[in-house]
Image (cartoon, rainbow, N blue to C red):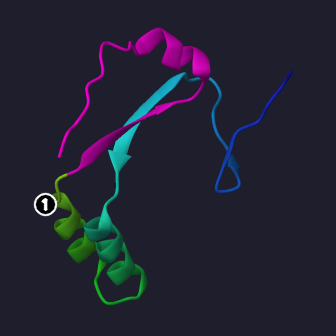
């Protein structure tokens, strides 16, 4: 069976099992918005983005990647 994975209307590259990259938070979106609204120049926006702490995200593109990488070790109950 041939499947396609779409993200925002664009086909994802199926050649990768795991994709690691940066996550844009609210501060990044605000900066990009200021640029696109014409309130900040490109240089100002890039200067602001340089100082933001970036967080990473991991995308497991298929079940096989999950099965081969993740291992359940334990669980515990949280009591309030």
Q: Position of residue 8 (x, y in %)?
A: 64, 56
Residues 33 and 55: in front is 55
Q: Report the residue at 29% width, 81% height from top.
A: 41
Identify which residue is drawn at 17% across, 53% down.
Answer: 53
Report the number of numbered marks.
Answer: 1
Q: Residue furthest right?
A: 1
Of 7 and 38, the residue lying toward us: 7
Secondary structure found at label 1: loop
Left or right: 72 as drawn, with respect to 80 = right
Q: Mark 1 points at which residue?
A: 51
Residue 79 image position (x, y, % from top left):
19, 40
**Residue 59 falls left or right of residue 13:** left
68 magenta-colored: yes
Can residue 73 be found in the magenta stretch?
yes
Residue found at x 31% / y 68%: 26
Residue 62, image x and y in percent? 60, 24
Residue 32 picture location, percent across and down: 36, 73
Task: Give the residues drawn in magenta, as a range.
Answer: 54-80
Is 18 drawn above or below residue 56 in the view shown? above
Q: Residues within 10 Å of mark 1 (few under 14, many from 20)?
A: few
| Quarter of image, res 70 | top left
As drawn, the residue found furthest toward the front would be: 79
From the viewer's side, name the closer residue of 67 and 33. 67
Tell me the quarter of the image containing the N terminus.
top right
61 versus 25 height, above or below: above
Return the residue found at the far top: 68
Residue at image coords 57%, 29%: 61
Which quarter of the picture shows residue 57?
Answer: top left
**Outermost left residue:** 51
In the image, residue 18 sits, relative to residue 36, either above or below, namely: above
């Amino acid at each position: 069976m041939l499947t396609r994975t779409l993200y925002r209307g664009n086909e994802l590259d199926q050649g990768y099992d795991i994709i690691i990259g940066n996550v844009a938070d609210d501060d990044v979106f605000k900066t990009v918005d200021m640029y696109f609204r014409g309130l900040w120049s490109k240089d100002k926006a890039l200067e602001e983005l340089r100082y933001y702490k970036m967080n990473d995200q991991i995308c497991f593109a298929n079940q096989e990647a999950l099965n081969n990488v993740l291992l359940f070790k334990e669980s515990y109950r949280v009591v309030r």
